[in-house]
Amino acid sequence: HQLNRTVYLNPPKDIRKKNIVWRIKKPIYGLKDSAKNWYCSLKTELLALGCVESILDPTVYYYYDNEELKGLFICHVDDFLYGGCGDKKFKNNVIDNIIQKYDISSS
């Protein structure tokens, strides 16, 4: 996801040159809107993978196959909890794609 505003940053002192600033194009750690951008990116991906957002809690997503619940995905900041009924579709269709897209470990 991209930032919804223009952000400039002073380079670190050891590589700073006169009158040079960096324009940040993507969310980085420490920006106040980075967490929201991360959540929006993750939400977009989960919905694209066929998950359904919980009406009661926007950090909970359900995965159904033929109207039968096959998996549950819960996110809090950058921590995930997921589980399924033993059906490989949820892991193959959702979890493996999230791990690959965001280059995260599954431990």
Image (spheres, rainbow, N blue to C red):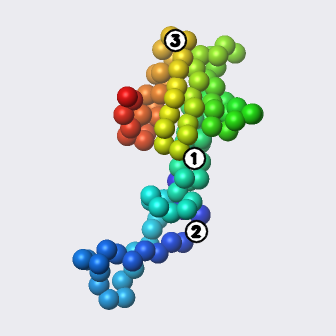
Helix, strand or loop at mark 1: helix
Query: On screen, 8 above or below 70?
Result: below
In the image, what residue occupies the spot 51% across and 29% down? 81
* Residue that lies at the very extreme toward the right in this rendered image: 55
Name the side, left or right, on which 24 lies relative to 13. Answer: right
The quarter of the image holding the C terminus is: top left
Query: On screen, 57 above or below 28?
Result: above
Q: Which residue is mark 3?
A: 87
Residue 41: x %, y % from top left? 55, 47
- Label 3 vs label 2: CA separation? 42 Å
Q: Of the residues shown, which amino acid type is indicated by label 2? A: Arg
In the image, what residue occupies the spot 57% across and 28% down? 73
Asked whether 79 or 72 is in front, the reply is: 79
Helix, strand or loop at mark 2: loop
- Label 2 vs label 1: CA separation? 17 Å
- Label 1 vs label 3: CA separation? 26 Å
Q: Earlier in the sequence, mark 1 or mark 3?
A: 1
